[in-house]
Amino acid sequence: MKKKILRSLSCTIAFCAIGTLNGYAQLNKTYLDESQPIEVRIESALSQMTLEEKVALCHAQSKFSSKGVPRLGIPEVWMNDGPFGVRAEVLWDDWAVANVTNDSCTAFPALTCLAASFDPELAAMYGKALGEEARYRNKSVILGPGVNIYRTPFNGRNFEYMGEDPFLAATLVVPYIQSLQQNGVAACVKHYALNNQEVWRDSVNVQISDRALHEIYLPAFKAAVEKGKTWALMGAYNRYKYEFCCHNDILLNKILKLDWKFDGVVVSDWNGTHNTREAALKGLDIEMGTFTDGMSKTEINAYNNYYLASDFLRMLKDGEIDEEVVNDKARRILRLIFRTVMNTKRPFGSFASPEHFAISRHIAESGIVLLKNQNNLLPLDFAKIKTIAVIGENADRIHSNAGGASKLKAKYEITPLQALTKRWGDKVKITYTRGYGSYTPTFEGVIPSPYNADSLKNEALKVAANADVVLFFGGLNKNRHQDNEGFDRQSYDLPYGQPELLIELAKINKNIVFIIASGTATALPFEKDIPTIVQGWYGGSEAGNAIVSVLSGEVNPSGKLPFSYPKKLEDCGAHAFGEIAYPGIKNDQKYMEDILVGYRWLDTKKIKPLYAFGYGMSYTTFKYRKATTDRKEYTVADTATLTFTLTNTGEREGAEIAQVYISQPKASVMRPVKELKGFTKVKLQAGETKTVKIQLPVKEWAFYSETSQSWVVEPGEFVISLGASSDDIKHKCVVTIK
């Protein structure tokens, strides 16, 4: 009897096992066949998923991952911060660093530095290298690049973005995305949209005209979708028309998914989701970082408490929400998975390689802007220099390890002092003194500097008095209320007593080079007293070497400012209308300057900036000649060709960024005095002349009509202006649009 029972049990188990195997064999595995069109694979997988599995795709399972479908062999999605480097690994349910030993990355320059290069080829190199690092770390999505418009110098995240001009940002973001995604890693362009300040970022409601929205704040996102074909996009914290941007019917459903035909995934910013029904129906696909996670709740499966989790599932089961809603989200997420982690043909990537550090250095060198060079103090002449005083905390400070979501665990970051010592230490006497000491604001108050300000100043004056040249490394840092996520600046002035110190230094030594580390403009009240000023940005792993290359003349600076440098804060359009325009009143804010952002405001109001958008000097000089257009009349379907000659009239090779602006003096609506619509970077040997052509599609000269809700190019005369910056126009051509 016992043997019969065991035999019967064995047969039952075997029968069940065979049944299970047969059931598995009956699965439609078309979704695994990479020879099939991706849309066929998506429908194959979707048809075999349960409702619970579809919902599980739509919310996080850890700080940086969301679920796949294990039963079908569909892997999870792993994301990571990465506007200029792949962030260190963190714990599953905690922001604490995981302390693994294989995540020390290449730190690339901040995106303001890339923007200052005005170089799409460099943007492609940047994206490719970053994508390789993300792929090596097995990331499906890299959270970047950021393309929010620089509206105010107070924005704490300006350094993460590409400047004040929508055409510049749109031009650079496309090759960045395309090259990054060649690695089988999705770019997640952020923060869509109108996230142009950090103060009240999670609640402020932005009131803005349709023209300003479409002409200034959306073009870079539109280019990322329509031309760059980005696979993911991150919603913003703030509100537009009183709806949070992470579930905003106009921004996500109408503009992004309907008008632009975006087929990728909308990811919420962390803690950017607020309501189940709105998240479900108003465009969000993956909910990340909501407060009900494992860090704040100790219950099992706390991520199931997200809005697009158990409550979403309940609404679907009860018929409150149609199942096609979750099907659309699942299709998008499956499309992302098939493009990335389930793409067996994607390359393997590489990480913290010599090639990546070389690219990082090249971008940093190309973005450095020479703002002032009185008496040609730069490049430094070592035949005449015996002693150098290096002053300023930023000479010996690491910047890549702070700033918020862009914080990196870099394999190394060369400081200016390290580079100076290595490059010149055996040729000249280099003496370093701090000069000023920063302090760190905290939620509880302020952690004061451990240094005595008077002692630091006196020592700096003493060192400067005995030096042939003073190199002052100042600017901002990534402390709170400087260049830092979550906090806007509170003053346009340089912090930590730098202006007063620089004025004192100028009295005792006229040979001062001021090198600014920042991602934004600052007040420079001492500008007339300082002969040489360099905008050095945050240069990543090779920051110090890049700066030294420019100071020594090994690299001729060619960067141009991607934003204007107003003389005073009130000259900035966002600060010309009081609190209602910035930061807002009671969480309501009106963009009173409308389409007149940056140089558009300064030009129209006839306010002279300290340094204009597109401005930057070289160690050589350039001459523009013979600017002509191929025709005098065009239609909207045409592309105008501007031809001119550019000559290097100096004694060394260099590169010039020629810029083309358009204007329509007589229009039915207000139009800016000029708008950037083309640029090119021209490299020339000493004495060399090149004929340069810039293509200008006429359809891009349009304004957004609030009456017809469409783009309009009005017939009439247009002025095409060729210049070295927005306020240095060399030639003008007048053409007619029929």
Image (cartoon, rainbow, N blue to C red):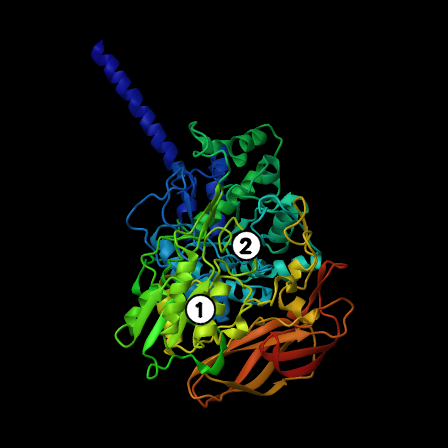
Task: Judge left or right: residue 630 versus residue 80.
Answer: right
The numbered mark, 1 or 2, whose residue comes first in the sequence reads 2
Q: Kindly identify the residue that appears in the image at 43 percent across and 80 percent down.
A: 377
Residue placed most toward the observer, 708 or 425: 425
User: From what the image shows, is residue 400 above or below residue 534?
Assistant: above
Give amino acid for label 1.
Answer: Ile
267 lies above or below 172: above
Mark 2: few, some, or many residues within 10 Å (few <14, many ≥20)? many
Question: x, y (%) of residue 350?
Answer: 32, 58
The percent coordinates of residue 133 (x first, y second) are 36, 57
Q: Which quadrant of the view contains residue 709?
A: bottom right
Taking the image as shown, residue 658 lies to the left or right of residue 715, namely left
Q: Which residue is mark 2?
A: 489
Alpha carbon distance from label 1 to label 2: 20 Å
Residue 407, compared with residue 644, is above or below; it is above
The residue under label 1 is: 515
Residue at (39% x, 77% y) in the render: 555
